[in-house]
Image (spheres, helix red, strand yellow):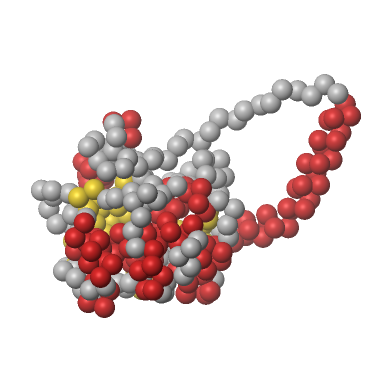
Amino acid sequence: MTARARTAQRPPTRRGPAIAVSVVVVVVIVVVAAFFALRSSGTSQDASSINAPVPADVETAITSVPRSALDAVGFDSSVVSTFHRLAGQPALTADGKPEVLYIGADYCPYCAAERWGLIVALSRFGTFSNLHLMRSSSTDVFANTPTFTFYGSHYTSPYLSFVPVEIETRTYQALQAPTRAEQALLTKLDAPPYVPSTQYDGSIPFIDMGGKFLDIGASYTPSILDGLSWQTIAASLRDPSTKPAQAIDSLANEFTAAFCTLTHNAPGAVCTDPVISHLESQL
């Protein structure tokens, strides 16, 4: 299986060499000032979107991706890595249903990428409410990756229980703490052989699907989302020729197949899809 990346620490600040020629300094200052002047309104507007409710057009697009688009994408293992299959683990359940436990953080760019596919897939089994816009940290790798936060959100489904834990904000402040049982799972499973070595212990995102499947780290590179707006990414999910669709829809299909295994192929309208049935047999 393809090894997953782990969220990097904040990169150190690097200083370039000083410029000795005063004319060059003036030119650089003018260019930089002009650049930020042009961006100022857009930047402030984008910053105000963080933690804002998801716009209706974006929510509709990500929670109702056409089956035709998902089927056309299928699953591409050259773009999206495969989940780990767990053996000997007790079933993970909540409220009498298979539990999908997600542990991540708002600052985490790999969590940012993973949430897109997770939301698309979970929306085939239930309904989200109170989702909010988010960007990953501005100081981590893949800075400001557009995404959502599960903090404060709600999910209802007759088939699955979704339990999200966002441990820190995008500015690295404490947000939610895992329960003792959740922390025990994280300690036990977020370690070799499910991560490459002990230096990756505790990697996020950590997603335990019913005690049967495990997803740790990034399934695809967040660079695919670089420079794109929420609206652009959401709209692209119905077009299999776009890079976001090829990654996000592929990941959503992988999640869907795993969830169908947990629910014993319910609902039939989702799980009897030949693309999902085939992928389920490959997990």
Question: Residue at the spot x=86%, y=33% of the render?
Answer: 26
Which x, y percent locates residue 120? 39, 66
Residue visible at 18% across and 54% down in the picture:
212
Q: Position of residue 80 (x, y in %)?
A: 37, 51
Q: Quadrant of residue 150?
A: bottom left
Quarter placement of the N terminus: top left
Q: Which quadrant of the rendered structure holds the C terminus?
A: bottom left
Q: Is residue 27 visible?
A: yes
**From what the image shows, is residue 13 above or below residue 216?**
above
Say whether residue 14 is left or right of residue 72: right
Q: Residue at x 26, y 66 (%)?
A: 276
Question: In the visual, does 208 lie left or right of 4?
Answer: left
Picture layout, residue 232 above or below residue 21: below
Q: Position of residue 96 (x, y in %)?
A: 17, 68
The residue drawn where x is 48% and y is 68% is 239
89 relative to 75, above or below: above
